[in-house]
Image: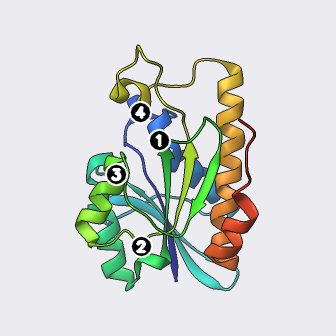
Amino acid sequence: MLAIVGLGNPGEKYEHTRHNVGYDVISIIAAKLDTPIKKLKFQGTIGETIYKGQKLVLIKPQTYMNLSGLTVQEAMSWYKLEPKDVLILVDDIDLPFGQVRVRAKGGPGTHNGLRHIVQCTGSGDFPRVRVGMGAPPPEWDLADWVLSKFQTEEERKIAYDAYLTAADAALCWAENGIDVAMNRFNKRHAE
């Protein structure tokens, strides 16, 4: 039994913003697996399926980003999951825009959603797929940056390509484990 949790904020206002990477990647995975994300449970919407012979639950917390840990904690308790069995999909302003990075565990960094998950579960030992949004331009406030939408067709293409890669990385993790996913998806990028 595994879970993939895509972090984001509920509501039309936040759809397809930089901070809603997790929601968008979960939607891609759900489409690939023909698994609707409609059931209300754990203060989130979920979809359950069988993937490569084991149960997989896809989760979009509906608590707003800063309270994501509530959903993660409830799902872990219900399904009797360890942190290593829960993959978190998240945006990351510390990665260059469009870069995807897979990690076995780590601290929350500047991300309030990850911070709340660590706070609620008492662990940072969650595998994660981080999608780079880049740092905000100097004239932008951080909150405004992460809640903004992509402005150009080129930005939307870069983001969508990264989301497809993140979805593939998540499914690789579910099938082969974190080490294979890291080896396959953590490529060096030219600066």
The residue pinned by badge 1 equals 20
- CA neighbours of label 1 inside 10 A, class few (<14), some (14 to 19), many (20+): many
Q: CA distance from mark 1 to mark 3?
A: 11 Å
Whether the residues at callouts 4 and 3 have beta carbons within 8 Å, the answer is: no
- Mark closest to the chain's N terminus, 1 or 4: 4
Percent x, y for residue 72? 35, 66
Q: Is residue 149 visible?
A: yes
Residue underneath mark 2: 125
Residue 151 lies in quadrant: top right
Residue beneath the point at 40% across and 18% down: 140
CA gap between label 3 and label 2 equals 15 Å
Instruction: From the image, tell me which residue sits under label 4.
Output: 14
C-alpha separation, residue under disc 4 versus residue under disc 3: 15 Å
Q: Quadrant of the C terminus?
A: top right
Name the mark on residue 171: none
Tell me if mark 2 has few (under 14), some (14-19) or many (20+) residues whose alpha carbon lies within 10 angstroms of its own: some
Q: Identify the residue shown where x is 38% and y is 51%.
A: 109
Q: Secondary structure at mark 4?
A: helix
Q: Residue at x 29, y 72 (%)?
A: 74
Alpha-carbon span between mark 1 and mark 2 = 22 Å
Q: Amino acid at mark 3?
A: Gly
Q: Position of residue 23 (x, y in %)?
A: 50, 48
Instruction: Calculate the distance from the C-alpha at mark 1 to the C-alpha at mark 4.
Output: 7 Å
